[in-house]
Image: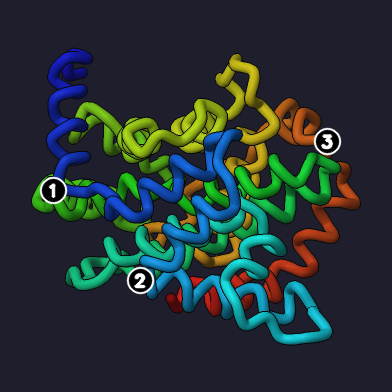
Amino acid sequence: MADSIALNRLFTRIGEVSTLPSSALRIIAVANDENSSADDLLHLVSSDPALATRLLRTVNSARYALKQRVGDLRSAISLLGFREVRNLAVTVHVSDMFRGGSPYRHYDRQGLWNHMVCVGTLSRMIAHTSGYSRTVEEEAYLAGLLHDVGYVLIDQCLHSHFRQVLDELGDSTTPTPKIEQRILSFDHAQLAGFLAGKWNFPERIRAAIAHHHDPASYEGEHRELVYCVAIANYLATHRGVTALGVRNVPPPNEAVLAGSRLSRSHIESIWQTLDETVEASRMMAAV
C-alpha cells in the first residue's frame, strides 16, 4: 500500500488535469452558500449556454408536468431551486470527461456514464422512498452521479494500469476495489472522494462517494446518504447497467438495508419500476 503522502500527490496531480470548468465551480460555490441570491445564480447560468439550454429543457420535461412552458431562466431557477441547478451544472460538465476513449473488454466510457446517471437517479428515488428530505434527495442524486468518476480519471491518467485492472477483472466476481488496491494501491472510490473535496462538495457527499463499496464499515454521521448510493449501485449493477461490464457488486447487508429505512416492499417496488428508471436515466445521460 502506498503511503498517504504519495497518494495525496498522485490524487492532486490527477485532479489538476481533471477539473470542472470555472463556471461550474462558481455555480457549486453559489449553490452551497446560504447567503447567495437568485440573481447570483442567474448571472452564472446565463453565461453558460450549455447549462442554460439544459436547465430550460429539464424544467419543461414530463417530470415537472407544468401546465405552461417556462421560457426564462429566472423562472426555471425559482422552480428547480439552487441545489437542483447545481446538480444539472455538474451533470452537464462532468459528461464532457466521458467523450472519446476506446472500448476495452467490457468497458467503454459511455456505458460507465450511463451507469453513473442511473445510480444518481436511483439514489434520489431511494432517498425519496425512505422519507428523507428534499435536500437529501438532491444530494443523493449528486453523490450517485459522481460515485464512479474515479474510473474515468484512472482511464485518462493511468491508462495502462487501468487496462491491467480490466484484464484481471475479466468476468470475475471479485469486487473491483480489491483488484484496484492490488494494482494501484488505491481504488476509484478513494479518488472520487478526493476529487469531490477538491470541487468543494460537502462532507456528506464526499462520504457517500468514498464509501459506496463499504457502507457497512462507515461510522460517520452521514449514513443515510452513504446507504442510498450503495444500494443504488447494487441495484443498477445487477439490472445490467454496469460500470465496467461485470456484475460484481455484492448485495448490501441487513444493517445497511435497515439503516436506509427501506422495507422489503419498498425494495420490491423500486425493483419493479427499475426498467423505467433505467430508461429515464439513459435519456438524461444523453447530454
Indicate the secondary structure of the residue bearing disc 3: loop
What amino acid does circle 2 point to? Gln
What amino acid does circle 1 point to? Cys
Cα–Cα span, label 1 and label 3: 39 Å
Examine the image and state in which quarter residue 36 appears.
Answer: top right
Indicate the secondary structure of the residue bearing disc 1: helix
Cα–Cα span, label 2 and label 1: 18 Å
Cα–Cα span, label 3 and label 2: 32 Å
Indicate the secondary structure of the residue bearing disc 2: helix
With 113 as the anchor, is 276 left or right in this view?
right
| Residue at the spot of label 3 | 261
Residues packed near mark 2 inside 10 Å, few (<14), some (14 to 19) or many (20 plus): some
Along the line of sight, the residue nearer the viewer: 278 or 242? 278
| Residue at the spot of label 2 | 110
With 135 as the anchor, is 15 left or right in this view?
left
Image x and y of residue 15, in percent: 21, 40
The N terminus: image quadrant = top left
User: Which of the numbered marks, if any, corresponds to residue 157?
Assistant: 1
Image x and y of residue 204, in percent: 56, 29
Earlier in the chain: of badge 2 and badge 1, it is 2
Earlier in the chain: of badge 1 and badge 3, it is 1
Q: Residue furthest bottom?
A: 68
The C terminus: image quadrant = bottom left
Q: Residue furthest front?
A: 39
Contact check, label 1 and label 3, Cβ < 8 Å: no
What amino acid does circle 3 point to? Arg
Earlier in the chain: of badge 3 and badge 2, it is 2
- What residue is rendered at 60% in x and 34% in y? 34
Image x and y of residue 252, in percent: 64, 37
